Image: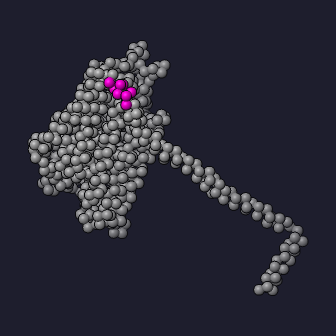
């Protein structure tokens, strides 16, 4: 089974190719079957490869399968080779498993899409999965870079899928350009790796990394991390991710849960042998994650767009993951990546179910009272909310607590405090969204005379006002919700802390990462767990008090602390600052270069040369008059000039 690894990315690529060529001629149901079947089959092969790997001796669970030599140049060559180890195997299951559920969900969500758009959508989804699988499976930095750039392209295609909407087109460009900034650093890092090691193969690089000067390793790792900052939306390159909500909701789920933003965390974890040799780079990673986590959590506190709340939540949770890999708890970081994929995909798909039911309304000020109308969406969304809030024994409880405990155990007390505060903020903003969406009084109107119609963005209006008839989503959408809800409940038991029992994942990752023993007394570990649970419960309680028990409190606080509220509401004005500093200034610079350098200098030189040539031609043309006296005069002048030169010489 190990030798069939190539099937894992090949199947989604085949699905994308078939739908790209034939989707206009195929019925919609067949387009869906091809797309979902390709990813589902890839998940089955990934599962078989996982069990095949687990059946081998635990000290030999690293397999390098070379398919062919891609670039043979003298002594240098790059193979198209796939690496299967506990890290890539788990990522394969997350990408294909969660990706398959999102594909199935999309059948119902995109049902109102026109036929050509329907085929294009599933083509892009399959291509997105293929790109992420190439990134995960590649056994060298060049293949990883290929997958890295392809996921960026796919995100652009899907975020701006409804390109006729100016907001979607702008969001796609913003995502593409912002991530390119980080990708430039990542590309430089890969080039520096090649010039330093003479190879791009992971095994060779990691085996000789200790022989390289630490300052050079620091430069390499910081450049690699620059790519992670862009792709995983960390400070200061996080601004593209909230705007990416303009794409279809399944795209948001795929980007936030199974692909794209997790690529940066995976890359740092895969490059752990380099980061371990540079304490400075590791500290930069950890502190970037910590500051991003609390910073974006504060923004999520006041947002009213449900999907944007979830977007800032993703950035914050990614911050936790970078804290983990920055302090050397690589297993904890990947563990949180896995559990986050479950509950964040569920949250986004739940938000999409709400949009589907509410005719596109996503502003929580126009929601409320949906618990009775959408019972299946309600209960599954609640499971995801409890998981991300760190409620005891839900998936996020185990993974987040392991990160916080690791920060405390490694002496990063300040980061632990930041993480603990962020945990409370997370619980507050997610239950604020939950209560405003499913509880409280309905803030929408029903127009039973008007049949439900959905345009390509699930949005409609009547005389400028939204009128809806809330309803539960079809089974093709709610079944994936139910499966993800189960995973959000039980997924964390794979990484229970030792104080509660055996930690399967810590042992599972040993062939890749060094064991990360916390060296904490049982009483200390229980104290840390208690503090984390208390922070989460406090956040939930405050959300209930503010939005259910005493709903006038938020309005009063917003008025009393209007400065702070406006700061958070406007997201610290970072978008405006970036727009003024880079977009406006860049536009002015481009206009200056065009008007001065291009029009006046380059065009002026070209046009001036043309005019000079024309003038010269007019002069020389007058010499060719056809009169013998003119030619005789020219000969006389030439003779005088030559004689004068000879005499004076």
Colour basis: one colour
- Report whether 406 appears left or right of 304: left
- Among the 4 quarters of the image, the one containing residue 486: top left
Direction from residue 471 to residue 116 in the image, left or right: right
Q: Could you say which quadrant of the image residue 597 lies in? A: bottom right
Overall secondary structure of the magenta section? helix
* Residue 524 percent across, percent down from the top left: 12, 44
Residue that extends furthest to the top in the rendered view of this protein = 449
Count the marks: how many? 0
Quarter of the picture containing the C terminus is: bottom right
Residue 50 vs residue 151: left or right? left
Asked if the stretch drawn in magenta spans residue 81, the answer is no
Q: 649 and 222: which one is in front?
A: 222
Q: Is residue 376 left or right of residue 171?
A: left
Residue 559 lies in the magenta stretch:
yes
Q: Residue at x 15, y 49 (%)?
A: 518
**Residue 55 seen from this side:** no
Looking at the rendering, the stretch of residues picked out in magenta corresponds to: 553-561
- In this view, 194 is above or below 270: below
Residue 233 vs residue 432, the one in the foreground: 432
Please identify the residue farthest to the front as the structure is shown: 560
Tell me what residue is drawn at x 42 percent, y 51 percent. 181
Q: Where is residue 113 drawn, in percent x and y?
A: 41, 30
| Rendered location of residue 306, percent (x, y) | 35, 30
Q: Position of residue 457 (x, y in %)?
A: 42, 30
Say if residue 284 shows up in the picture: yes
Q: Nearer the viewer, residue 130 or 403?
A: 403
- For the point 35% across and 46% down, the residue is 234
Tell me: residue 543, above or below residue 69. above
Residue name at image x 39 percent, y 17 percent: 445
């Amino acid at each position: 089974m190990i030798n069939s690894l190539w099937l894992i990315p090949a199947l989604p690529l085949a699905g994308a190719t078939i739908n790209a060529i034939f989707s206009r001629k195929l019925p919609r149901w067949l387009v869906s079957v091809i797309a979902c079947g390709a990813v589902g089959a890839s998940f089955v092969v990934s599962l078989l490869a996982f069990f095949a790997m687990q059946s081998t001796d635990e000290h030999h669970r690293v397999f390098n399968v070379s398919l062919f030599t891609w670039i043979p140049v003298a002594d240098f060559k790059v193979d198209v080779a796939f690496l299967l180890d506990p890290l890539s195997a788990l990522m394969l299951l997350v990408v294909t498993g969660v990706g398959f559920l999102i594909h199935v969900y999309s059948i119902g969500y995109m049902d109102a899409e026109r036929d050509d758009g329907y085929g294009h959508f599933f083509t892009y989804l399959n291509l997105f999965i293929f790109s992420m699988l190439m990134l995960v499976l590649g056994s060298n930095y060049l293949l990883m870079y290929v997958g890295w750039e392809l996921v960026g392209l796919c995100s652009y295609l899907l975020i701006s899928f409804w390109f006729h909407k100016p907001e979607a087109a702008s969001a796609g460009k913003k995502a593409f350009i912002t991530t390119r900034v980080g990708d430039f650093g990542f590309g430089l890092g890969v080039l520096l790796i090649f010039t330093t090691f003479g190879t791009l193969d992971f095994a060779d690089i990691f085996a000789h990394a200790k022989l390289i000067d630490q300052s050079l390793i620091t430069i390499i790792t910081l450049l690699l991390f620059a790519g992670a900052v862009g792709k995983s939306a960390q400070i200061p390159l996080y601004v593209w991710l909230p705007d990416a909500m303009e794409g279809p909701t399944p795209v948001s789920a795929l980007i936030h849960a199974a692909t794209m933003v997790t690529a940066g965390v995976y890359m740092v974890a895969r490059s752990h042998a380099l980061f371990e040799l540079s304490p400075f780079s590791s500290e930069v990673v950890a502190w970037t994650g910590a500051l991003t986590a609390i910073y974006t959590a504060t923004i999520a506190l006041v947002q009213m767009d449900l999907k944007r709340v979830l977007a800032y939540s993703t950035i914050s949770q990614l911050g936790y993951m970078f804290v983990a890999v920055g302090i050397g708890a690589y297993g904890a970081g990947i563990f949180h990546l896995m559990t986050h994929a479950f509950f964040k995909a569920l949250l986004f798909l739940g938000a999409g179910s709400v949009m589907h039911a509410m005719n596109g309304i996503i502003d929580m000020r126009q929601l409320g009272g949906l618990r009775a109308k959408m019972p299946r969406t309600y209960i599954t969304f609640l499971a995801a909310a409890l998981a991300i809030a760190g409620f005891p024994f839900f998936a996020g409880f185990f993974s987040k607590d392991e990160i916080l405990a690791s920060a405390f155990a490694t002496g990063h007390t300040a980061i632990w405090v930041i993480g603990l505060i962020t945990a409370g903020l997370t619980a507050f903003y997610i239950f604020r969204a939950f209560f405003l969406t499913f509880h409280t009084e309905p803030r929408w109107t029903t127009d039973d005379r008007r049949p439900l119609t959905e345009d390509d963005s699930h949005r409609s209006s009547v005389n400028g006002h939204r009128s809806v008839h809330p309803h539960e989503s079809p089974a093709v959408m709610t079944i994936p919700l139910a499966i993800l809800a189960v995973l959000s409940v039980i997924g964390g038991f794979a990484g229970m802390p030792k104080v509660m029992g055996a930690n399967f994942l810590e042992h599972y990752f040993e062939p890749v990462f060094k064991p990360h023993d916390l060296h904490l007394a049982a009483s200390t570990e229980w104290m840390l767990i208690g503090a984390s649970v208390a922070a989460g419960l406090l956040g939930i309680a405050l959300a209930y008090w503010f939005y259910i028990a005493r709903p006038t409190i938020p309005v009063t606080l917003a008025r009393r602390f209007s400065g702070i509220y406006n700061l958070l509401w406007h997201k610290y004005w970072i978008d405006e600052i970036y727009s003024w500093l880079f977009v406006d200034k860049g536009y002015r610079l481009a206009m200056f270069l065009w008007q001065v350098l291009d029009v006046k200098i380059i065009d002026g030189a070209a046009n001036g040369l043309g005019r000079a040539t024309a003038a010269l031609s007019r002069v020389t043309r007058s010499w060719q008059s056809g009169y013998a006296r003119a030619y005789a005069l020219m000969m006389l002048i030439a003779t005088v000039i030559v004689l004068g030169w000879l005499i004076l010489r």
